[in-house]
């Protein structure tokens, strides 16, 4: 396996003790990203340091990634701006702001969560 997720309870080496800090709509995207990395760059020894949402986009921080792996990660981070973080819907998902908080949400979830 090329992608390793080893939570560090001391938080000195990585922040994976917090888990994936995103809503469930992006979990399939993250799984696909990890599967793609394992398939496309099996020679890399990638350690996941943190996975979170920041300013409505996925952030997937790693160490040990090659330039090719970093391009793949960047591509999936770009995809996240078009997928509802809450439910995973694609078609109407876009960046929304409410009280200074940014999220990528579809129309239904934006209304439900007060991001209209």
Image (cartoon, helix red, strand yellow):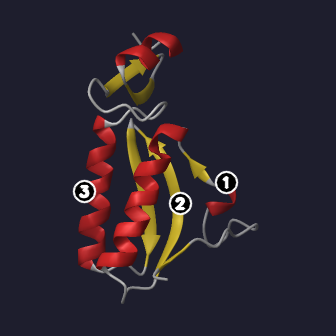
Q: Position of residue 28 (x, y in %)?
A: 45, 49
Q: Position of residue 58 (x, y in %)?
A: 40, 47
Label 1: few (<14), some (14–19) or many (≥20) C-alpha neighbours in 10 Å? some
Q: Label 2 belongs to which residue?
A: 50
Distance (Cα) linking label 1 and label 3: 24 Å
Q: Position of residue 34 (x, y in %)?
A: 43, 66
Residue 87's disc number: none
Residue at 53% over, 67% down: 49
Chain-order first, disc 1 or disc 2: 1
Q: Which residue of the protein is positioned furthest toward the right in this rendering?
A: 9
Chain-order first, disc 3 or disc 2: 2
Residue at 44% over, 35% down: 85
Mark 3 touches mark 2? (CB < 8 Å): no
97 shown above or below 87? above
Q: Label 3 belongs to which residue?
A: 75
Q: Quadrant of residue 40?
A: bottom left
- The answer to whether 111 appears left or right of 106 in the picture is right
Which-is-in-front pick, marks 3 and 2? 3
Where is the C terminus found, in terms of image quarters? top left
């Amino acid at each position: 396996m090329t992608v390793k997720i080893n939570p560090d309870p001391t938080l000195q080496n990585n922040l994976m003790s917090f888990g994936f800090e995103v809503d469930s709509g992006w979990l399939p995207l993250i799984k696909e990203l990890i599967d793609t990395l394992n398939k496309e760059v099996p020679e890399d020894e990638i350690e996941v340091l943190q996975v979170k949402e920041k300013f409505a986009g996925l952030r997937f921080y790693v160490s040990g990634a090659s330039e090719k792996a970093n391009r793949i990660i960047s591509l999936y981070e770009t995809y996240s701006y078009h997928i509802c973080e809450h439910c995973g819907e694609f078609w109407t998902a876009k960046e929304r702001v409410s009280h200074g908080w940014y999220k990528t949400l579809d129309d239904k979830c934006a209304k439900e969560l007060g991001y209209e």
